[in-house]
Amino acid sequence: MRRGFKKEAKEIALQIRRDLRLSLTAPIDPWVLAEWLGIPVVRLSDFRKSAEGAYRYFSELGRSEFSAVTVFDGSRRLIVHNDFHAPTRQASNVCHELAHGLLLHAPTPILDDKGCRYWSKEIEDEANWLSGVLLVPDEAAIAVVKRGMDLALAASYYGVSVPMMTFRINVSGARKRVQRFTRRSRKSTIRAG
Ligand SMILES: [Zn+2]
């Protein structure tokens, strides 16, 4: 990831929470964020009639192949996501696409000139990172560790998968930060006693 990106992502997420009047430890609903950004979110199951073949393939055999995609009409965006995935995965898929939008990532062709799926690691890494920061800010990860919350419970509270919650706790340095905090307050308790 490019230099300064993580700081930028944090600022974007902070601004979003300010705009949505959400505290740093409150869960965020990607569908509410999409509405606020004016980006329509359409479910794969909405295509049951209009694109039956694609619908059947991606809801059954190819379920894992399709998470979500942003469709462009000029500069307007629309997100199509696979609502056959687990709800937490749907939330992170939609949030990932919204992150592309917030980062103003330009549309890329679905297939490159060799007919392979087009995929830019840098762009995807950025969207994944911002999506994680939006769903579980550092402050939320710290609150989870501080309260000794069960990981599965914390994950469902924030609408993310357990691996995502674990990832956010690890990269935010929440455990170390809480340890430091407890050590400091223990010291002051001793001093006060
Ligand atoms: Zn992406």
Image (spheres, helix red, strand yellow):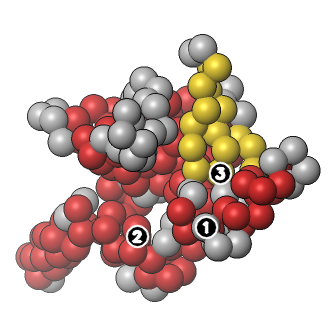
Q: Quadrant of residue 85?
A: bottom right
Q: Quadrant of residue 32?
A: top right
* Residue hosting label 1: 62
Q: Position of residue 8 (x, y in %)?
A: 27, 32
Amino acid type at mark 2: Met
Marks 2 and 1, the one that precedes in the sequence: 1
Is 128 located above or below residue 106 in the figure? Answer: below
Q: Nearer the viewer, mark 2 or mark 1?
A: 1
Q: Residue furthest right?
A: 49
* Residue hosting label 2: 165
Amino acid type at mark 1: Gly
* Residue hosting label 3: 81
Residue in front for this viewpoint, 180 or 74: 74
Q: In this orientation, does residue 183 appear? A: yes
Marks 3 and 2, the one that precedes in the sequence: 3
Q: Nearer the viewer, mark 3 or mark 2?
A: 3
Is 45 located above or below residue 121 in the figure? Answer: below
Point 70% across, 72% down: residue = 60
Q: CA distance from mark 1 to mark 3?
A: 13 Å
Amino acid type at mark 3: His
Q: Quadrant of residue 35?
A: top right
Q: Nearer the viewer, mark 1 or mark 3?
A: 1
Point 42% across, 42% down: residue = 115
How many numbered circles are shown? Answer: 3
**Position of the N terminus by quadrant:** top left
Marks 1 and 3, the one that precedes in the sequence: 1
- Provide the secondary structure element on which disc 3 rests: strand
Mark 1 neighbour density, 10 Å: few (under 14) some (14–19) many (20 or more): few
Point 44% across, 81% down: residue = 151
Q: CA distance from mark 3 to mark 2?
A: 21 Å
Is 6 located above or below residue 143 in the figure? Answer: above
Q: Is the Cβ of the residue at disc 3 closer than 8 Å to that at disc 2? A: no
